[in-house]
Image (cartoon, helix red, strand yellow):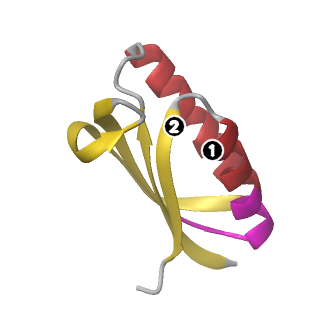
């Protein structure tokens, strides 16, 4: 298993319950084949530049260990998710 870090931004114009549901959905995908070591919902923040006509977003940072297949599935779901406006998955070397 490898260490990964994912940072994703959720749209600011949706309800808090929908934000929580999206966070739990992605946690479930990671937990299905890996282990979450750190999970931090950083809240609503101003974006550095406009993304898809949004100036704000809910930032979420997750550190986890998993097989590469879990990361592939997580990336596939984030691409097609309407809630996520931007994401980045990296190998965590620390």
Left or right of 19 on screen, residue 43: left
Q: Secondary structure at mark 1?
A: helix
Residue 69 percent location from the top left of the image = 80, 65
Residue 46 percent location from the top left of the image = 19, 39
Q: Residue at x 25, y 47 (%)?
A: 49
User: Crowding at label 1, few (<14), some or many (≥20) Cα neighbours within 10 Å?
Assistant: some
Tell which residue pokes out farthest to the bottom in this image.
Answer: 93
Left or right of 55 on screen, residue 28: right
Residue 2 percent location from the top left of the image = 64, 79
Q: Residue at x 59, y 44 (%)?
A: 27
Whether the residues at callouts 2 and 1 have beta carbons within 8 Å, the answer is yes
Residue 78's disc is: 1
Left or right of 79 on screen, residue 19: left
Picture layout, residue 30 above or below residue 26 = below
Answer whether residue 47 is magenta in the image. no
Picture layout, residue 42 above or below residue 83 = below
Picture layout, residue 44 above or below residue 62 = above
Front residue (pair 53, 78): 53
Residue 18's disc is: none
Alpha carbon distance from label 2 to label 1: 6 Å
Q: Residue at x 70, y 46 (%)?
A: 29
| Residue at mark 2 | 84
Answer whether residue 66 is magenta in the image. yes
Q: How many marks?
A: 2
User: In the rendered structure, which segment of residues is drawn in magenta?
Assistant: 64-72
Front residue (pair 59, 66): 59
Q: Secondary structure at mark 2?
A: strand
Picture layout, residue 19 above or below residue 57 = above
Mark 2 or mark 1: which comes first in sequence?
1
């Amino acid at each position: 298993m490898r260490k990964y870090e994912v940072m994703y931004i959720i749209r600011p114009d949706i309800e808090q319950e929908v934000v929580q549901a999206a966070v739990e959905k992605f946690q479930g995908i990671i937990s299905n084949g890996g282990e979450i070591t750190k999970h931090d919902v950083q809240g609503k923040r101003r974006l550095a530049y406009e993304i898809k006509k949004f100036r704000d977003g809910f930032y979420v940072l997750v550190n986890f260990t998993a097989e590469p297949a879990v990361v592939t599935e997580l990336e596939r779901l984030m691409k097609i998710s309407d809630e996520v406006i931007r994401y980045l998955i990296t190998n965590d070397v620390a």
